[in-house]
Image: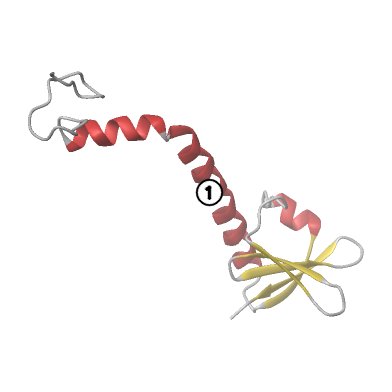
Amino acid sequence: MKKNCLECGAILKGRIDKKFCSDYCRNSYNNKINKDSKNLIRNINNRLRKNHKLLSELNVTGKTKVTRTKLLDGNFDFNFFTSIYITKTGNTYYYIYNQGYLALENDYYLLIKKE
């Protein structure tokens, strides 16, 4: 019984359990299958990267106070962060990798850098 490559349809030679005629066809086939999940992950990582970059630019000293407007002007997206830290006093810090922020009163945010 002859088997064909799952990607290009070429007749397969060699091992009985072979599914692809080449690495190119194997990669091409798997990239098509995983396209949607890879796009989702890529988009989330891009958003996290942009958030981190903005916090790094605004927080050069390691501890800075900024307005919500300043974050939004830089297209900061509050829906994307990598971790949450809640202090014993109940303050909630949101982190994007090593850059964190804490909501203060009057639409101010404390930006901090975790060393």
Task: Using a 10 Å C-alpha cutoff, classify the residue at mark 1 as few (fewer than 14 neighbours), some (14 to 19) or many (20 or more).
Answer: few
Query: Where in the figure is residue 8, as x and y percent of width and height?
Result: 21, 21
Residue 97 x, y percent position in the rendering: 58, 66
48 or 7, nearer to the observer: 7
* Residue denoted by label 1: 46
- Using the image as rendered, state which of residue 72 and residue 40 is in the foreground: 40
Q: Is 37 situated left or right of 100 in this image?
A: left
Rendering coords of residue 70 (x, y %): 75, 57
Q: Amino acid at mark 1?
A: Asn
- Pick out the residue farthest to the front: 1
Residue 49, horizontal then vertical, whole percent: 54, 55
Residue furthest out toward the right = 106
Q: Residue at x 43, y 33 (%)?
A: 35
**Image quarter hosting the N terminus:** top left
Residue 106, quarter of the rendered image: bottom right
Residue 103, compared with residue 87, is above or below; it is above
SS for callout 1: helix
User: Seen in the image, is 21 located left or right of residue 110?
Assistant: left
What residue is at 72 percent from the left and 56 percent from the top? 71
Color encoding of the figure: secondary structure
Query: Which is nearer the eye, 54 or 8?
Result: 8
